[in-house]
Amino acid sequence: MSDGDWGVFLEGAFKAADSPGKELLKFAAMRRRLVRRPKDQNCVPITEIEWESAALSEHQRQKTTGIVVTPSGKARHRDKPIVANILSLSDHVWWDQRKLSSSVRRRWDDVRRAWEPIFRHSSTLMFIDPHIDPDKPRYGDFPRMLEYIAKINPTCVISVHRISPSPLRQAAAQTWACSFKRWAENSKKKFTLFVRGKDEVFRDRDIPLHDRFLISDLAPFSLTNGFDFDGESMTMSLVDPSLRQKTTDFFDKKYGPGVYSAEVEP
């Protein structure tokens, strides 16, 4: 809130203490989950009580899921279910009801609305679909997605990952890169293409051959379908916590047997 002043206040409040609040802020900052809200020149909070009031006012203007405060802050607002004590978040219904999955219709306009925060705030994005192919009409909207990301988040680093149906060599990866080049040209967005052999994918049984993912530096998501937008519904779920780092590291691997890459530029 207040163009980052709230974060500065919290950093000072938690600086000397090893507290859940400090860890929550550290995680949120590391995952780029903190979004700045504009400063209200008519109200510049200074004390904790003033910040609580500002948060509640912000909630009236733009609805939020919840407001996390200190134990003393919760004591001041015990009659407001939306306000949660940072030391006991699981005691609050809205925290336990956070959605770990959602459904979206596989049409570009629906996907754009549903995934806009991910597209806008990610530093890196990996699109993993074993069958993604510029020569197949059902993937025709993918360049529009690249173009949209380039417009709202031009510094985002993008990679596209697929599986090779035939024995893989670097020459084959370059051939695939030529096929994908028109997507870069249409969207004016550079990306890295990764092509993996089937043997490479089968090295890790926790990551099945035909799985689809959208992996952001914010979080990795598993998809029930790929990026071929045919109008049907698909479900997007956060990857199980025990596999999140493993999944990200697997697809972030740039070198090794059966892994080939090529830069695709407009």
Image: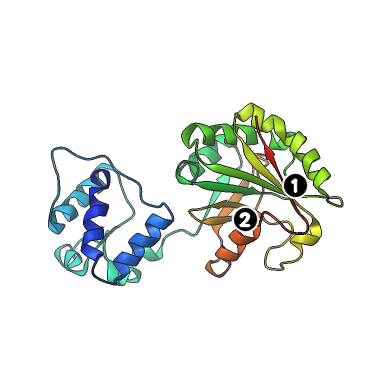
Q: Residue 2: which quarter of the image? A: top left
Q: Name the quadrant of the C terminus.
A: top right
User: Which amino acid type is marked by label 2?
Assistant: Asp
User: Upstream in the sequence, badge 1 or badge 2?
Assistant: 1
Q: Secondary structure at mark 2?
A: helix
Q: Relative to residue 177, is residue 106 drawn left or right?
A: left
- Residue at the disc numbered 2: 252
Instruction: Please say which color scheme the image uses.
Output: rainbow
Residue 161, percent from left and from top: 68, 48
Q: Is residue 30 visible?
A: yes
Residue 13, percent from left and from top: 21, 63
Q: Nearer the viewer, residue 88 or 110?
A: 88
Q: Residue 192: which quarter of the image? A: top right
User: Which amino acid type is marked by label 1?
Assistant: His
Residue 131, numbered circle: 1
Query: What residue is drawn where x is 67% and y is 32%?
Result: 183
